[in-house]
Every structure is written in C-alpha cells, then in structure tokens.
Image (tube, grey):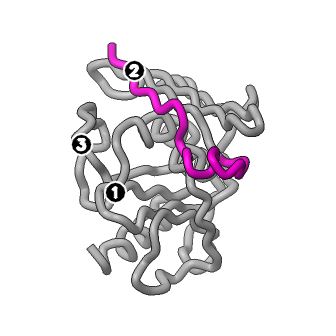
C-alpha cells in the first residue's frame, strides 16, 4: 500500500488567503487508487471516495453535471490556452484536486490542464478516484496511464462530466499539444 499526500494543493491560493486550497490523500494498492480524501482547508468541505463505493461530499453522494457539449460547459483551467477552446465559460481556480472534485460534484463540467506535465501524482490521484466513483471521467491529455507513483511521473490532466464532453475536451486540448 502506498499513500500519495499533497498537504497543500493550491499553495499560492493559501499564501494569498484565497479560500480554494486543499489537502489530498490517496491510498493505492496493486489495482490503483483504493481510497481518497480531499479536504478544502479554507472551508472544511470534504470529498471522499472508496473504490467501488461511490463518492461523497460532506457525506452526501455526488455526481457530475451531465453536460455533453463543450459549447455549453463551464470549464476549470490550469494555464493559459493559446486559443479559445469552445467552452461557454471558464474559471482558473488554482487547486487541481479541488478543481477535479468540482467536476465530480457537478460544479464544473470539465477541467483542462493547458500546461504540459505540470501535475505530479499527489496533485490528482485522490481527486481522480473521487471523479471516477462519482461517474466523471479523468484522463491524461497525452493518453498516458494516470496510475503514476513516482514524483518524476508528471501528467497533463483533463476531466469531463460525460463521455461526449470528454471527447471534445481531449480534441480541444490536442490542438496545442
């Protein structure tokens, strides 16, 4: 068993007292993420998931928005894309784990990392399990396995509420690979 820990995801937000930063933990076994906890340290809100048992926010089951088109989507971003990617609106919030949990809980429709290999496993593993158990999709924009365990394994994470939206997100992200 391995536990990936990010004590302060969104450290810039924390240092500037912006209330969007988290602690994230993910226990991994041979099959991948097993249990996860992501806590917004500014508000105390808790996202948790256990493989095969669904995802919850503060004890209440969560699910993604159901958005199917990028043109209708509210998208969380990391980095600046070189062009408008076709979304309805976007937000750059600054804490990947919470951004992904926002997709899992239907607050965002999608998440696009516009940088290249910015995120280490500690940044996304816990939220990946929360998304998966909630019914949202998460992938690496370059098609690599997300079950990365080395600090040197960096990924370009994207997420979406539905498969059709994920197809559009991946295609949009691929335009500036």
The residue at 46%/40% (across/down) is 128
Which numbered circle lies on residue 156? 1
Which numbered circle lies on residue 153? 3
In terms of depth relative to the viewer, which is nearer, 11 or 150?
11
Residue 27 located within the stretch drawn in magenta: no
Q: Position of residue 34 (x, y in %)?
A: 43, 22
Which element carries disc 2, helix, strand or loop? strand
Residue 3 located within the stretch drawn in magenta: yes
In terms of depth relative to the viewer, which is nearer, 163 or 37?
37
116 above or below 134?
below
In terms of depth relative to the viewer, which is nearer, 94 or 159?
94
Give the spatial CA distance, label 1 vs label 2.
21 Å
Give the spatial CA distance, label 2 vs label 3.
15 Å
Between disc 1 and disc 2, whose residue precedes? 2
Answer few, some or many: residues within 10 Å of disc 1's Cα (few below 14, many 20 plus, some between 14 and 19).
Answer: many
Q: Which residues are magenta?
A: 1-20
Between disc 2 and disc 3, whose residue precedes? 2
Q: Image check: 67 left or right of 61?
A: left
The residue at 34%/57% (across/down) is 156
Task: Determine which quarter of the picture holds residue 27.
Answer: top left
Give the spatial CA distance, label 1 vs label 3.
10 Å
The residue at 42%/58% (across/down) is 158
- Cβ–Cβ below 8 Å for labels 1 and 2? no
Q: What residue does disc 2 label?
A: 3
Q: Quadrant of the C terminus?
A: bottom left
Q: Position of residue 145 (x, y in %)?
A: 25, 44
Which numbered circle lies on residue 177? none
Answer few, some or many: residues within 10 Å of disc 2's Cα (few below 14, many 20 plus, some between 14 and 19).
Answer: some
Q: Position of residue 99 (x, y in %)?
A: 58, 52
């Amino acid at each position: 068993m391995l536990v990936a820990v990010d004590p302060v995801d969104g450290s810039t937000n924390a240092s500037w007292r912006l209330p969007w930063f988290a602690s994230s933990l993910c226990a991994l076994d041979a099959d991948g993420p097993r249990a996860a906890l992501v806590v917004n340290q500014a508000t105390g809100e808790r996202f948790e998931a256990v493989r095969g048992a669904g995802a919850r926010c503060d004890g209440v089951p969560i699910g993604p928005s159901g958005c199917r088109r990028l043109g209708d989507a509210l998208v969380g971003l990391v980095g600046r894309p070189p062009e408008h990617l076709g979304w309805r609106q976007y937000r750059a919030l600054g804490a990947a784990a919470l951004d992904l949990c926002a997709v899992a809980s239907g607050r965002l429709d999608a998440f696009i990392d516009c940088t290249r290999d910015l995120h280490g496993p500690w940044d996304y593993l816990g939220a990946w399990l929360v998304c998966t158990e909630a019914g949202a999709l998460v992938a690496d924009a370059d098609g690599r396995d997300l079950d990365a365990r080395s600090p040197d394994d960096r990924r370009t994470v994207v997420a979406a509420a539905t498969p059709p939206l994920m197809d559009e997100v991946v295609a949009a992200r691929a335009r500036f690979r």
